[in-house]
Image (tube, helix red, strand yellow):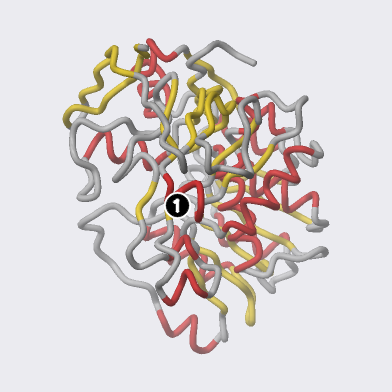
């Protein structure tokens, strides 16, 4: 049986091809892809390549779908199960895996990097992923496009736990893309008193307001530090979450946060970025500065519960959907920062 897939054959080169549909072995699963989100990391691989990705490769790791065939030894799963996936394939034996931190596995792989991902009609889930990765069942009434948000939202939940976000806080979120808006909505859900978004793009400032931001600042026209101090009686905010890949913004975060405050760096910086942090601010203000990358299986499980229970307006995050044959258009829309989340639906929306 043949299927359609989109291969990354070189930097900035996508090829829509027919290929043989994988056949699962006894310990493997075949997934019929319902939806796959376009992540910022997919765009970085597309633009710059990645040492973990050998061409040609089917990328894409924000995946939801239906199990089309289950190997004879996959007792937990059956044909017809609706599931969503985490991205990591842990080794299961390194120090991090033994502490249930498989997303930091020293030897593991990732879907869409070392193994083919979701920009296809079907994908094979290898034994290592079936046995040690995160496969979570989705409620029957959740559309595939919303279920595909479980992986990025798990990363958001991981960040919220790491930065110790709590009810009653004033939180500043730099960046109001899909991740920033997830943070904004989740912060309001857990009881943040005031959430302030910082974003240059006017359409995205409106998205931030739609997802619950109490105030949106345009750093091109406003003095962000001055406004934050005005909003916090001169103390600074309790917590800052930086989803924008900017060293200047990282530095500003240390300035606007209060003494004993918390700072989370979610976005990495482009290669070749120069300039360092004023570590005196970390020292003398006794700041808790942390980063987060990926998400544990536990966070992925929790993210699916939020989605199953409709805890946030997840559907509003999805502003563009494309058929598999128009994946390149989806990439260009995402690169152009049109809307928020762009999703590919290989078998039509559902």
Numbered label tally: 1
Camera sees residue 206:
no
| Mark 1: few/some/many CA within 10 Å (<14, 14-19, 20+) | many
Q: Quadrant of residue 194?
A: bottom right
Please give the name of the residue rendered at 32% of the width and 71% of the height, measured from the top-left corner: 276
In the rendered view, does 29 fall on the left or right side of 214?
left
Looking at the rendered structure, the secondary structure element under dot 1 is strand
Residue 160 sits above or below residue 12 on the image: below
From the image, tell me which residue sits under label 1. Answer: 88
Nearer the observer, 232 or 74: 74
Q: Quadrant of residue 45?
A: top left
Residue 144 sits above or below residue 348 on the image: below
Image location (x, y in percent) of residue 344: 48, 21
Image location (x, y in percent) of residue 283: 49, 88
> Which residue is outermost to the front?
72
Please give the name of the residue rendered at 50% of the width and 46% of the height, measured from the top-left corner: 130
Q: Quadrant of the C terminus?
A: top right
Q: Quadrant of residue 123?
A: top left
Please give the name of the residue rendered at 35% of the width and 53% of the height, measured from the top-left corner: 109
Image location (x, y in percent) of residue 232: 73, 65
Nearer the observer, 142 or 267: 142
> Which residue is outermost to the bottom?
284
Nearer the observer, 208 or 217: 208
Nearer the observer, 314 or 242: 314
Camera sees residue 339:
yes
Please give the name of the residue rendered at 39% of the width and 12% of the height, measured from the top-left corner: 326
Residue 335 sits above or below residue 99 on the image: above
Image location (x, y in percent) of residue 145: 61, 25
């Amino acid at each position: 049986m043949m299927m359609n897939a989109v291969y990354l054959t070189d930097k900035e080169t996508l090829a829509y091809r027919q290929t043989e549909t994988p056949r699962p072995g006894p310990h493997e699963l075949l997934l019929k892809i319902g939806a796959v989100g376009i992540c910022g990391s997919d765009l970085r691989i597309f633009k710059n390549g990645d040492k973990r990705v050998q061409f040609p490769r089917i990328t894409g790791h924000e995946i939801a779908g239906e199990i089309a065939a289950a190997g004879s030894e996959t007792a937990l799963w059956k044909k017809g199960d609706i599931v969503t996936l985490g991205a990591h394939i842990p080794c299961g034996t390194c120090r991090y895996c033994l502490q249930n931190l498989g997303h930091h596995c020293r030897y593991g792989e990732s879907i869409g990097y070392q193994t083919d991902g979701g920009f296809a009609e079907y994908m094979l889930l290898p034994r290592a992923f079936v046995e040690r990765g995160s496969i979570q069942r989705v409620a029957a009434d959740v559309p595939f496009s919303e279920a595909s948000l479980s992986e990025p939202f798990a990363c958001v939940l991981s960040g919220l736990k790491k930065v110790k976000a709590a009810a009653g806080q004033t939180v500043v979120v730099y960046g109001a893309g899909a991740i920033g808006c997830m943070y904004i909505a989740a912060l309001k859900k857990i009881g943040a008193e005031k959430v302030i978004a910082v974003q240059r793009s006017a359409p995205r400032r409106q998205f931030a307001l739609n997802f619950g931001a109490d105030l949106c600042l345009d750093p091109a026209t406003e003095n962000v530090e001055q406004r934050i101090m005005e909003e916090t009686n001169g103390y600074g905010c309790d917590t800052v979450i930086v989803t924008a890949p900017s060293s200047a913004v990282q530095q500003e975060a240390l300035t606007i946060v209060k003494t004993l405050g918390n700072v989370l760096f979610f976005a990495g910086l482009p290669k070749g970025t120069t300039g360092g942090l004023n570590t005196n601010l970390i020292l003398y203000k006794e700041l808790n500065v942390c980063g987060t990358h990926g998400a544990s299986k536990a966070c992925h499980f929790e993210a699916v519960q939020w989605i199953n229970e409709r805890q946030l307006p997840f559907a509003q995050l999805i502003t563009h959907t494309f058929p598999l044959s128009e994946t390149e258009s989806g990439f260009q829309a995402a690169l152009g920062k049109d809307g928020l989340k762009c999703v590919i639906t290989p078998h039509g929306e559902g």
